[in-house]
Each structure stands twice: as C-alpha cells, then as structure tokens.
Image: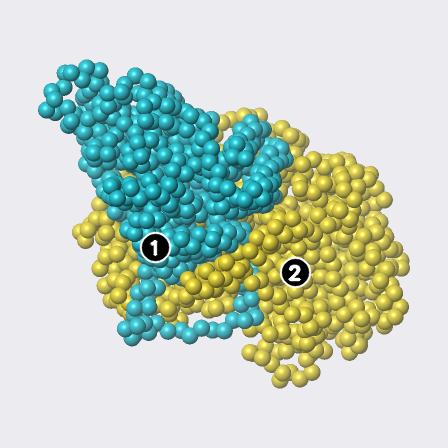
Amino acid sequence: MNDTITLEKKVAKSSIVFDEKHVLQELKHYLPTQTPLKDFIHHNSLHAFQHMKFYDAIFKASKIFGFKVTLQLADFRKMYEDGRIKKEVLDKIINDKKGAEQFLNWKEKLLTKEYSESIFPRVGALRANWKTKHKIDLDTLVQPLLFRVLCSYLDQGISVWDFPQENKGFLNAIKDLEKNSFTSFFKTKRPKKYLEEGLGIKELLKIVVGNEAYYEQYLFDQQFSHRGWSGMISAIESEPNVLLDKRVTSLHDLVVFDLLLEIDALDKQLGNDWEPLCNKINSSPVDLFADAPLTELEEVFKLWQDAFEWSYYDEVLSGIALGKKKQIATPAKTSFQAIFCIDERECSIRRNIESVDPTCETLAAPGFFGVEFYFQPQNAKFYDKLCPAPVFPKYLIKEINAQGERKHELLYTKKNHTFFIGSIITMFYGFISAVKLFLTVFLPKMSPAISNAFIHMDKTATLSIENKDISYRENDLQIGFTIEEMAARVEGLLRGIGMVKNFAPIVYVVGHGSSSANNPHHGAHDCGACSGRPGSVNSRVFAFMTNHPKVRAILSSHGLVIPDTTEFVGGLHDTAADEIEFYDEQQLNSVNEEAHKKNKAAFEDALDLNAKERSRRFASINTKGSLKQTRKAIKDRSVSLFEPRPELGHGTNTLCIIGSRELTKGLFLDRRAFMNSYDYRTDKDATLLTGVMRPIGLVCGGINLEYYFSRVDNHKLGAGTKLPHNVMGLIGVANSADGDLRPGLPLQMIEVHDPVRLLVVVEHYPEAVMKAITITPEIYEWYNNDWVHIIALHPETNKFHYFKNGEFTEYTPLTKEIATIKDMKCFVETAKEMETNHIVDATKENLPVYSLEN
Amino acid sequence: MSQLLQFFIWVPLFGFIISLMLPRKNERLISSVTIGTAGINLLAAFSFVTYWFMNDYPVLDVKQFVFYKAHDIEIFLDFYFDKTTAVFSTVGAVLAFLVAVFSKFYIHRDGGFKRFMNNILMFFVAYNLVIFSGNFETLFTGWEILGICSFLLIGFYHDRYLPVRNSLKVISVYRLGDICLILAMWMSHHLWHQNITFINMNDSAAVASLVRDHYMYVVFIGVMILVAAAVKSAQLPFSSWLPRAMEGPTTSSAVFYGSLSVHLGVFLLFRTYPFWESVLAIKISVIAVGLFTAFIASSIAKVQSSVKTQIAYSSITQIGLMFIEVALGWHEVALVHFTANAFLRTYQLLVSPSVLGYMIHDMFFSFTPKKLEVGTSFFSKLKNTVYILCVKEWNLDFLLHRYLWSPFKWIGKALSFISSKAAIVILVIIFSVGFYLNLHPELIPVSISKIVPVVFSFFGIMIILNAFAEKGSALRAWLFVVLGQLFITLSVAMLSDEFGGLQVLIYLSGSMLFAGVGAICLSRIKKIDNNINLDIFHGYSQEQSRIGFIFLIACMGVAGMPLTPTFIGIDILFSNIHTHDYFIIAFTSLSFVFMEICVLRIYARIFLGQYKKATHAMAYRSS
C-alpha cells in the first residue's frame, strides 16, 4: 500500500509546473533580509515564519534549514543544576502542559533521558547528489568566483578599478563584459553561448536538473548554499537605495549566473556530455516546507525553554509587584526632567541620574522622539533616514554653517595599492604607521578611523528645522516642518509619555548613539528607532520644536500648557563611551543657564556611576578602581582598535515595560528592560496606547529575536566570531577571501545574551491592552503567535494578566521575595568574572531583579 | 658578543614551553607570559643592536650545537648576525610585542586563546631561528616550524570548512618551498663537501671558483633558493595562497601574512646573496620574478573588493619590488622598504574592520558617480580583458591546482589497485626482500646494483602518491605513507655502505614510533565510528580533542618535522644521496613533499572541519 501512495505522490509531483516568478518570490521570502551593514536594522531572523506559532515556527525552520533554535539540552540541564532554571517553575510548567499523570515521565525525559541532537536539514539534500553520485564538488568549483564577481559588481569603494558596467543590471553587465573582452569568466564555451542567447532560468534548469518536478527544490538548495550573498542580492533588489553607489541587480540574475557557472564547472569536469541531475533519480522531490509533528526532543526543548523564560519572568514580575507597592512618588517639585530613549541600555543611566539628583524625573520615548525626517549633513551627497526603518518621511532637515572640519585618515588612501606611487607611499606611510601602531596599542584615542557618535551632527551647526514656505522643497521632500506639523508631533510625543503637566524648568531630551573602533557592526549599537544611527539630530529638533513659541501657543490651545519658564535641551548619550553632549545650551535663559551648569555636573556624576555599573561585565576593567579610572577605562574601550566589545549592545535584553517610572524606580533590572513612559490615567480609553504599542513588536521584538537567534545558532543565524571577519565591498563581512557573507550578529555581541523572548508589561486594564494590540493584524501577530509575551498589569487590582491564545488570564508569581542591593558599589565590585564564554558561564551574571535600598 | 645570539632563540623557546603548560582558562597568565616573552625579546633586540652598533657592527658567526657528526656530515646550529639580521630582528621584535599586547584584548574569551598565544610564541622561535641562522640547517628548522605555525593558525577556526581547506592548501605550497630548500642544502653539501655556513658564502674567491667549475650546480642551488623564497613571499606563480591564508583572527593575519612571515623570502635572498650575486642567470631570474609579480599583483590589488585580499596583493607587490632591490644590490633600500611595508601592512590589516565605517562616511561626503562605460574599442576590450583576469586572480589558484597537484593526484588514483590487501602483502614481501638484500649486498648482481635502489625509490614515491590520492580509509592511507617511507629509506640505505646501523636507526626509530602512535589514534577513532574515510571532513576534535592532539604530534614525527628525531634523520638521509643519483633525489624529495601533505591531510580530514554528527551549532560550509 505504501508503494501506491509514493507512486501517487510521484505522479502528483511530476505534474507540478515550475512557476519561476513564484519560486523567486518564495526564495526572497525565506532568504535573510539584512541590508548592507552601513544600515543596521534589527529584525526577527526567522521573519519568514512569523505567521506561525513560535514553537511550531522555530522547529519547522530547524528541520528545513538545520538551524539550532534553542539552547542545547546539556545547557538547559546545567542551568537547572545551577538554579537559574527554577525547580518550582519547571514543575509547574510540566504539570500545566503535560498533566499530573505524565509529570514524572516528562520530568525524567527533561532531566536525564539521552537524545541525539543532530540536525540534518532538508535543504541541500538534492544538490548534494552531485558530490555523492558524480564526485563533483560544485560549491568549491562555483562559489569562489561567484562571490568574487558579485562583490566586485556591488563594491562600494574598496577596489580602485571599478567593475566596467553601464548600470543595466547584473546579468547585462556580465554579458557586456563577456562581449567586449578577449577572455571570459567561464572556462568552457557553452555557458558563454547560453548567456549570449539569453537562456532563462527554466531553460538552464532543464540542462542542469532535467526534471521539472525538482526545479524548485534545486533552486532552494542552490541559493541556500550561499544564503548570505543571495540574501544581500535579494535585499538590494527590494530596496536599491540601501547602496550609496547604486547598482541594479536581482535574484533572477544571480540564479542565472549561478546556473551558468554550474554548467561551466560540470562541462569542465565531465565534458559536454553529461546527464542532468534528476534524470535518473530514485527519490521523489521533497516538499521542503511540509509540516511535521514535533518530535519528543522538540517537546522537551519547548518545556525547557518555557521553564527558562518563566524562571526569569516570574521573579521579575514579583519584583514589579513589589515596586508597585513601594511606590516611590515623584517629588512634587522637580529640578529637571530628562527624556531618554526606551532603549534598555538607558535603563541604568536613568537610575543613576535619579540617584545623583533625587529631585529629577526621567522618562522615556522611542529615540527618534516622534519626529521623522531625512537629515543631510553639510556638504553631504546623501540623506540619512532618522526614524524607524519602515517609516518613509516626507521631510528633510539640512545642516548649515557647520564650523567643524571633517578629518581624514591618510592611511586609507587607495594609492598604496599601486605599483610606483604605491612603493613611495609605502616607504613613507610605513614609518607613520609604526608610530600609529604604537599609539593605537598604548594610547588609544579618537581618530577619523573610528566611528564617532558625536560627529553625526556638528554641534555648532544650524539646522533647517522650521519651514516657513511649503514650496521650499528638495528631491520631493519638504525642508523642515511647518508650525502645525511641529505642534502635532510634539503633542503626540508628550501625551504619549503622559507628560502633560508639572513641567520642570529644564527638560532634557537625550538621544543615544555609540562610538566604536574596528567595528563593521557599529550601526547595530546605535539607536534602533533612528534606523541604526545616533539620535542627536532628533533630540535637538524635538527640543527646538517644543521651545518654539508658536508651537507652544498651539499646544496651549489644545490644553497642553508648557510654562514659559520651561526650556527643552537636546542631547546625545554615547552608550559605549559614557559621554553626554548637549545642544544649543547658549539659548537657555539666565536662570536655567545656572541650573544647567549644576545639572551637567549631576549628569557627569551619573555617567561615572553608569560606567562603574557597566564595568561589572568587562573582564579587562578593574571594577574596584576609582570612579574616574573606571570611567576612563570605559571611554578607552570605545576608541580601542583592539577591543572587539566596545559595549555589549542590546545583549541581555528581555523586558519591555510600558508604564510610569514609579513601577520600576525602586528596582534594579540590570539594563535588561526597554522602558516606555506611559500614563494610563491620561489615556483611559487606550487611544494613545495603540500608538505607543505600534513600534514595540517591530523594534524591541525585532532586537530581542535577532539576539535570540544569533545566540542559539551563532554560526548559521549569527555572524560567528568577528575576529577573522573580512570586509567585503563595504557592504558586509565574510570569513576568508572566498567565504559567503555572514548576516546576523557576531559572537562578541551576543555572548552574554540569554535567549529569552521579550516580555512586555503594560500598566493598564487588560481590555485596554487587548484593544491596543489587536489594532492591526501585523501588530497582533507578534503576540498572538507568541513571538513576544505580553502581560497587562491591572492598575487597580495590581494583578498580572498574561496573554495566551487570544485572551488575558490572571497570573500570580511564584516568587515571594526578592533580594535587595544594599550597596551598589560593593555589588558591582564583588561581581564574578565569567569563567568561559559558554552560554552557561557567560550568562551567570545576567540578573533578574533586585530591590534597591533607598 | 656572538655567544649572546643564542638567547634570541632560548628566550622565546622558554616562553613557548612555559605557555604550553599554563591552564587553558587562565588568560591573564597566558597573556602575561606571551607579552613578557615578547617584551624581553624586544628589550634584548634593542640593547643588542645598540651594543653591536657601538662596536662597529661586525658580522658575527657562531657554531653552537653539533647534533650529529660523521665523515663529512656535520649537523649543527649556527647563528649569524649582520645588518640584515639587525633590521629583521628589530622590526620583528617590535611588531611581535605590539601584536602580543593587541591580541591580549582582541582574542579575549576566544575558545582558542591559549592555542593562539602558544602559536604566537612558537612563531617567535621560528622567526628568530630563521633570521639568526648561520647555516641552511638552522634556517630550515625555523622555516619548517613556521610552516607548522601557519598550518595551525590558518586552521585556527578548525570547525569551519574554509579555514581547514585553506590551511591544507597553504601548507602544500609551503611544502614545495621546503623541499627546494632541502635540495639547495643537499646540493651545496656536495659542492662544498661539508655542511656550509652562510659565512662561507661570503668568501667570494671560493664562490667564484665554484661558479667556474660547477656552473650548473650553482644555478641549481640558485633556482632552488629562488623558488623557496618565491613560495614564502607569495611571488608568482604562488601568490594566490596569501589572501587565502587570512583565515585566522585579524591579528595573526597581520603579523604573519601582512608582515613578518611573508618577508622571509626576501630574507632568504638577502642571506644567500653573496652566493648568487655573480651568477647573472639567477640575478635576472630574481628580478624577473619580482618585476612580473609586482605588475600582476598590483593589477590584482586594484580590482579586489575585499579589504584583506587587497592588502595581501598590495603587500605582494611591494615584496616583488624588494626582490628586485635585493638582486640589484640596493640592500639598504630593500631593508628600508621591508621595514616600511611590514609596519604599514600590519597596521592596515589591524584596522581593516574600520574600513567600512570610514569609507562609507567618506563616501557620504565626497561621492561622485563614476563614468559608467564598458567600451567597445580595441583598447577598452583589452582593458576589460585585464579586468576579468584580475578578478579571477589570473587563474593562479586554479592553475596551481591543475598543473601542480592534479597530475600527482591522477597518478595516485591510477595506482589505486595497489591498495588491495593482496597488494599490501606483496609490497611488504618486496620490502622484506629488499631489507635482506641491503644487509647482504653481495647477493645483488653487480649489473643491476645501480638500478635496485632506484626501483625501491620509485616504489616508495608511488606508494606515497597512492596515499595522497586515497579517498577511502584513513588507516590505509596512513599505512601507505609509512610503507612508502620505508621504501624510500631503504633505497637510500642501499646507495651507501655506511648508511647502515646508526643512521637508519636514527631515522626510523623516530618515524616508526610515531607511525605506531598515529595508527593507534586512528584505530581509536575507528572504534567510535566505523567510517573514517578521507572523502569528507569528520571534525572529530570536537569530541576527541586529546586524540587529535596526539595524532598531530604523530603526524609531525612521521613527516619529519622539527623538534622530532626524524627531522635530523632527513638531513642525514639526503646527504647520502649523491649528485648523480638523479632519479633517487627526485623521488626522495617528491616523496617528502607528499608525505607531509598526506599526513596533514589525514589529520585535517579526520579531526578538523565541521563535526559530521551536527550535534551543535555549525557554520555553513560556504562561510
């Protein structure tokens, strides 16, 4: 009977017609979407599976592509032994999921049963027949040249001699070059002829594969054998503007060239007379995307992962409940207010500034501060987008009258690669670089070669923020915002974070960026809400808008009164160097000018404390050193060429708290929580909440999941260790001269990260939260499919309501007590250095929650 | 003063041995030892050079350790110091120290931190051995250790496919250079009738008489030296290995392939200059290689779109020019050029990851769209042709594979019939007969006594080539390497009357012991996993790292790499072959090329690469 079924299947399969357009679309859907590294937008690495429930999705992806999608069994078990996965949580989860009867059975499976964790992916199996049956290693024969040609074509500025082309597309460029030269990329004649004749994918597949039923599977095998380059091509095809020096390209062209190179290699190895791969094949084509039930091991992983996550969540929730009870009220009269980004790295600077000046108040909003625009630095040939990636602004802000001069690094001159001039330059620069090398190692300091967050915008320059004439446009963008447009944005942001009264005399608006040296992934450390760039322009623009008298007049008419004595000041926090810079300080009134001097000192002290707190995770810094020493050590990291970890980026992020600062003020959350200020009291019907919730899944969830997947499979979903990385064409990194591009995050960024999904806690009624997350299917998908957890904290009953399967149900934390930090200094200084960077050791110092002694 | 020279070897060697014994997890201790060693080395280099300079910079030479002495064979370490050594040692010491400090932070928490630091120290030992060497034997020792370091550092990330493949690729090319050096050593031994030192070469009268009387032999030595230098310095046609060697952490690429290691070819030319200076053919060849390389490599550098590859080719270009400078006798210029290039390329490689941020930022402000044109004129077509050739690196990688290695692989494959069990038995019988005949040479008829050793030698190389092409069992390949080696040794033993007792013993004692150890290691793996075929990478060091390490030592022993007793044996072995034994010298040297490639290939296939059981996260093959 089995035979007849397979036979039927075979018949059914072979009648499948190959639909080129559809297959290319499918490929693009599953390939990585990371764009060239100059823009780093965090996103869910398994975005292609987001329409499915989390566990179904990850295990399916694992079967298809061979990813590891959770920690290894031994790691879970070790963490259980160490107490990081709690017994009571694990027991509860097994009980809830498997029932009391099966409890012992499953517990034994989790704790002791041996499993094979080998994964042999579906993708690649068909094309592997070239090697097993015909002894031909196509990858080795094709890929080095393929990557080289692709990289030369897309190169943004490494090569001295550009790819000769007329911007008519990749395949046309190859065709032109082949036609107008005396040699060829190919070793044999046939592919060149096919290229000239313009054979399409289907015709070429006929030659290579033969049987139409296998075309789709073969193309997946082929493109996923180098998913880095394929993904890059596909991303550039979808969004050509990600390259400064534009290139027309498409996945179609890549597939054709790939197939031509395969034919070339096969002709060279086997002569002209070989049979297509699938003419005589025994196995029927495989449906790569067929559903398969979870295996027992996957069930075990699922339980472990839940237990791992809830061991953390449970403790944090009980901490928040405690914090809610403690309720440290904001002082009636505040010395100043500071709005930071929701970024979890700003969590500690807020706590530290509050501890230095207990009369200040801190808030947080997404770091583009509600103003979306393109920015053009003076003399720049391009625009920078400064708002979340999916937004396409209609505004342009230009930098004018900049005083500072852009500095150059002579050693990057391309002339050293040439023959005669090269040798003279070599002789000359050689000795300069000897000195530079010495300084680099012993006296690291900022240089033009280092990405400096503060040069994103010139402090002395003027910005064209106000638009007085809407016909003032450039490239279809309006230059600056009109008064009404400004007012709308300011009001939107202030109301969103519940900042509608009790304004302090000075309100700081602090964006963030990150300086780092020798770091191709530096964009990943900048502000995610500003498309991976520093948020300095946004903070300055926002401050300008709120200070504008006409804007304030409109706001007053809407009942949002900002006193005349209140002034807003923009600023930028460098999260790696722990430095702050403020903008337009000279415009402050004299009273505020005095206060600002004092506040600045407070910020400096807070930065000292912040640096000290961060030093806990850096083995090379002596945590017991004086504050100034530690601060300097932290600053040096950001300019040291030898430092692969200038900061830990978003590593360890797990939480997102949407609510008032009172909820978290007395808590130590170890820089793991995104925090968005929000006051349910000013938004009973949750109209503002929908706006607040809109970017949470995409930005915070995206960051969290990118870290999750880069952590659990740093080799396939992450970029591996960055130490051997080689910059390719200024668009990405690869290992070696002949390696594939490596999307994802490098090891040094995810090393301390716990692969735990994001838990969003919203302080509001469950019905209100429900309303906010169901507003669009795209937003709802994040929560309904469990890619992000969400909990509503009922403002009156103080009970938690956990969202699961479309509804909120009450959750009572198991943890009864949480520990208290008595002395922060001592706490930091006694922290243990990790033994190894294996997950179990590396994350021991990721702390859940502590209560702070006031 | 010359007695002080040996300390430049002892210091790093001592540091290396200590660093081997340190606990793997104690980064602080390991880096202190490395930096300390490099620091002492640096101080010593500075003070010594100053002292030497103030004493009117004499040329120093000292004979240090005699390992073996019999008739005209005398194997000893010899140290030498002149201005070339002064420059190379100072530059080397500065770079090594800076890179050691840099690496302390850069490699922090890498799983292979200790391995990396051990390697760096082993590299210092090798580098100093080469630049302080006073004779070919000493130089060769350093040269060989350097090769092993390279193999280990290129394959540093041994659980990925490309580093392992490329480390094999590089060591294979290196091996070619090594053998040229052995041949140069062998020939000069016969020319001078003693193991010569570099200071002998400074005797221009003696050299002139050699050139007069044995012109072809001198040319032979010159060519061998040139090939060895071209291999090490990645000159044409061997250039394509250099960019592929940039697989390890950036710091190791910088110090090895950006600066120090890659300039040792130039050093070899410096050191042997007095010998070939008067031979116009060699001089012209050196200039031709350098000029040709500089042209081609600079054109390749221009089209490279990956930063490390581009730096590699730029460095090759400058080294090509240094070849010319040395040949023209502009030694001061060449030394300045070397110093500048070494520092520049090290720095460029170390800051290479910054290039993305800097160049994009720069482009943001200064980008002007370039003229887009393919061109149809003859000149444009010519230009496009060169462009395509440069993108393909003038097919160097392919040509090397095709014309250098493939023919041997083809021979090996054609001989696969000898890997049957019956064939092995026959081979063993033949060997035993040969062994018996060697003990009783009177049994061999005089008419064929000249041919018998050649036949055995031929058998030896064929057996080894068979092992080289073996895709089946690793154990069988191992057995064949050992068997091939026995045949080769026997053939040399037959050549010479004296080559009986002690000499055979010295050589075989080491070799056979290691062969046994290696076989045990492989059987252990075979017990775990029935399939230890050589057609795939198994990646066993993931679960059996200890066996892997022992097997690596066994490989080094069998292939006669430095620090093993076999190593000295090789030199003795070669000294027994006379200049007229063309076939035997050809077969023997070939077999030494392939023996090492074979054993390292077995090591790589079984212990390195992606772990085939896929139990943990693994990189794609292509990455």
Residue A730: tell me if it is visible: no
Q: What residue type is labelled 2?
A: Ala
Q: Residue at x 34, y 42 (%)?
A: B205
Q: Where is residue B540 in the image (x, y as percent from the top left)?
A: 42, 31
Provide the residue designation for mark 2: A453
Check the residue under mark 2 and report the chain it is in.
A
Provide the residue designation for mark 1: B287
Front residue of A34 and A428: A428
Q: Which residue is drawn at 78% across and 63% down?
A: A508
Q: Position of residue A485 (x, y in %)?
A: 69, 75
Dot 2 falls on a residue whose secondary structure is: helix
Tell which chain the image draws in yellow: A
Q: Which of marks 2 and 1 is in front?
A: 1
Dot 1 falls on a residue whose secondary structure is: helix
Please, is residue B522 above or below residue B82 in the view? above
Front residue of A474 and A366: A474
